[in-house]
Image (cartoon, grey):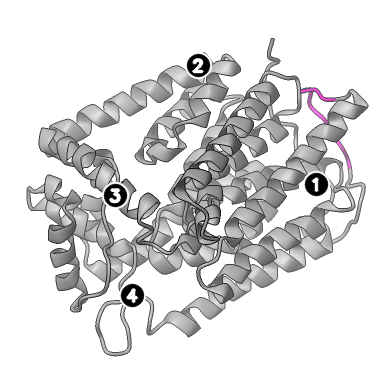
Amino acid sequence: MTTPLHLTPPGRGQVPPALVTMCAVLAILQIVFFPLYYGRGWIFEDNGLGSPTDFVNVWSAGRLALEGHPAWAYDWDIQKKIQVAVLGRTYPGNFAWHYPPPFLFIAAILAKLSYPVAFIGWACVSAIPYLVAMRAIVGRPFGLLLALGFPVVFTNVLVGQNGFLTAALIGGMLVLLPTRPVLAGICLGLLSYKPQYGVLFPLVLIAAAQWRVFVPAAVTTIALVLLSWLAFGTESWQAFFKWMPMFSQAFLVEGRAPWGKMQSLFALVRYFDGSETLAWTLHWMLVAAVAVSLIRLWRSNERYEWKAAALAVGAVLATPYLFLYDVMVLAIAIGFIVRVGLSEGFLRHELPVLGLAIVLLVAYQFLGAAPTGLGASLLVGCLIAARIGNSYRAGSGDARPFESSGVAHGTGGPG
């Protein structure tokens, strides 16, 4: 049997100075130095031509939808012609549109704006729910600093991707689940724009008998499908299913994107020249282990923060198609770890290990294409597993609220 789910009230202890310093430095570097280094090479280069980044496929797909040709968004050749016209230049490869038709609603809204305004607006607006989710998870204003200091913020803004939205929906679902299951289900239904996350969440919700979340999630997903069908026609869905195998072939078989850019175990094996068969075998073994562990965890009486953190990490580890901007979801898991640490104290090794995970994420910018995000995800997963293991050994794993007036290890610094 499962126990009722609820978040432990955040403690009143101060944030350890080392954690404040690390987050502040990272946030300042990302906020201040980003425009200094990329002000002339971010959206437009020095020569005035557009810089080829992921966001161009979002804007061009939205433009095709506004012009009455949403199905054309999935055609690589047509997409690239629009993108070349927008950027004023050609580029090697493709920025392909592979999202389900419901995401065309957002793309179409953005395409109503000029390309640079849409690019900047998307980064700013999508960051708001991410910040709100992190503030709620940590349970105090420090959550905002933690959110801004997460190194993947830099990457997500640089390429104009949707990592903020994905992290916000997963974080929102996990925060709302104990007290607002219907709203949590809606968040999960909206996450259907990322089908690769659709493996673990249903399994966990069914195992934990969270039907009040499962049902609204299903209803929201179905509603999005119907609305997109009415707005963009049957052809858009036909195009989506027609081009998906080609997209999978290009990026998961042929490796058109460098393997180091993807942050999954599958990509790591391919990065070191392992065979496709070996990569899929090891990856699905990992998925099975994660799924079994999460099901057992969510059926146990372990405290909710660890269930939520483990599910966020599991979502990152389970998908083979994972770029660094998708690792924004790891911030959600870290938020729950910090919440517990501020409530009952950090273990001696936790802050150093979190620091090492952050170093791995920062290192990606200097190593080029390297699967450092996978290493960071595994480190965070190990922290969660260690806490759960300690709880089981002590025989104290439960979901009852825990209140503390201080932090056991380290005090000082703003909260």
Q: Which residue is mark 3?
A: 247
Q: Amino acid at mark 1?
A: Leu
Q: Is residue 11 visible?
A: no
Q: Which residue is mark 4?
A: 43
Q: Earlier in the sequence, mark 3 or mark 1?
A: 3
Give the number of the disc on residue 68: none
Which residues are the magenta region? 397-405
Give the camera-side residue of 92 and 232: 92
Q: Is residue 405 shown left or right of residue 289? A: right
Q: Is residue 291 visible?
A: yes
Q: Earlier in the sequence, mark 4 or mark 2?
A: 4
Residue at figure coordinates x 52%, y 30% from the top left: 200
Give the number of the disc on residue 342: 1
Distance between the alpha carbons at the discs numbered 4 and 1: 39 Å
Q: Which residue is mark 2?
A: 212
Q: Is residue 353 shown left or right of residue 258? A: right
Residue 161, quarter of picture:
bottom left
Q: Secondary structure at mark 1?
A: helix
Residue 305, quarter of picture:
top right
Q: Amino acid at mark 4?
A: Ile
Q: Residues within 10 Å of mark 1 (few under 14, many from 20)?
A: many
Prevailing secondary structure class for the magenta stretch in the rendered image = loop
Q: Are marks 2 and 1 in contact (CB under 8 Å)?
A: no
Q: Amino acid at mark 2?
A: Arg
Residue 373, horizontal then vertical, whole percent: 59, 57
| Outermost residue, left side | 68
Q: Are marks 2 and 3 in contact (CB under 8 Å)?
A: no
Distance between the alpha carbons at the discs numbered 4 and 3: 25 Å
Q: Are marks 4 and 3 in contact (CB under 8 Å)?
A: no
Q: Earlier in the sequence, mark 4 or mark 3?
A: 4
